[in-house]
Amino acid sequence: MFLIRNHSAFGVAALALAATLLLAPQGRAQFAGDASGQSAFSIPQSQLIKPDALNHLLQGAPKTRPFVAQVGSHTMFSQAHIPGSVYAGPGAESNGLQLLASKVASVHKNELIVIYCGCCPWRHCPNIGPAYKKLHDMGYTNVKALYLANNFGDDWVNKGYRVEQGQ
């Protein structure tokens, strides 16, 4: 196997990541700095929504559109965000989770909520897992996480989906 023969830093890191993925309980990886188990991988695959599916939902009548919240950095949100989405604070920080709770306070517990970050590749995102858990702990039953494999730019903007700027 190439990774075993090649002892470069990249090869060793890739091998360690592969071992983590293979040995993680229930097929979910837990990364350093995520002792809480709230990584992006803590979100069940059935609760993920792909960019094309969300874009399609956003084309519907206003009353049928989901509540969309960005749970990453404010800088990213002000540069470009999904039209109609609200900034709900970084999910990795307690003040961000408090802001998220206040933003969804008027949303019915069974209404579709879509959260997204897109700060970095999905496997490294510190924000999406804690935000998803917070909403479930608050009793929201219809929460989806927008699966952005690489980042918001690659997986939303570069696909030609609409964005807004500011705020």
Image (cartoon, grey):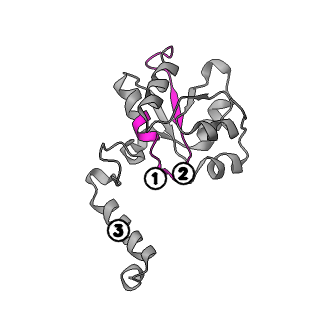
**Residue depicted at 28% across the width and 51% down the height:** 26
Residue 109 colored in magenta in the image: yes
Label located before the other in sequence (3 or 2): 3
Answer whether labels 1 and 2 touch (C-beta < 8 Å).
Answer: yes
Residue 157 at what x, y percent from top left?
Answer: 69, 46
C-alpha distance separating marks 1 and 2: 6 Å
Q: Secondary structure at mark 1?
A: helix
The residue wearing badge 1 is: 124
Answer whether labels 3 and 1 touch (C-beta < 8 Å).
Answer: no
Residue 116 at what x, y percent from top left?
Answer: 54, 38
In the visual, does 157 lie left or right of 68?
A: right
**Residue depicted at 49% across the width and 25% down the height:** 99
Which mark identifies residue 59? none
Residue 93 at what x, y percent from top left?
Answer: 43, 36
**Residue depicted at 46% across the width and 40% down the height:** 128
**Residue depicted at 31% across the width and 66% down the height:** 19
In the rendered structure, which segment of residues is drawn in magenta? 106-131
The residue wearing badge 3 is: 16
In the foreground, 8 or 15: 8
**Location of the C terminus (image quadrant):** top right
Q: Residue furthest bottom?
A: 5
Q: Secondary structure at mark 2?
A: loop
Residue 148 colored in magenta in the image: no
In the visual, does 6 lie left or right of 154?
A: left
Label located before the other in sequence (3 or 1): 3
Give above or below for 82 relative to 41.
above
The residue wearing badge 2 is: 120
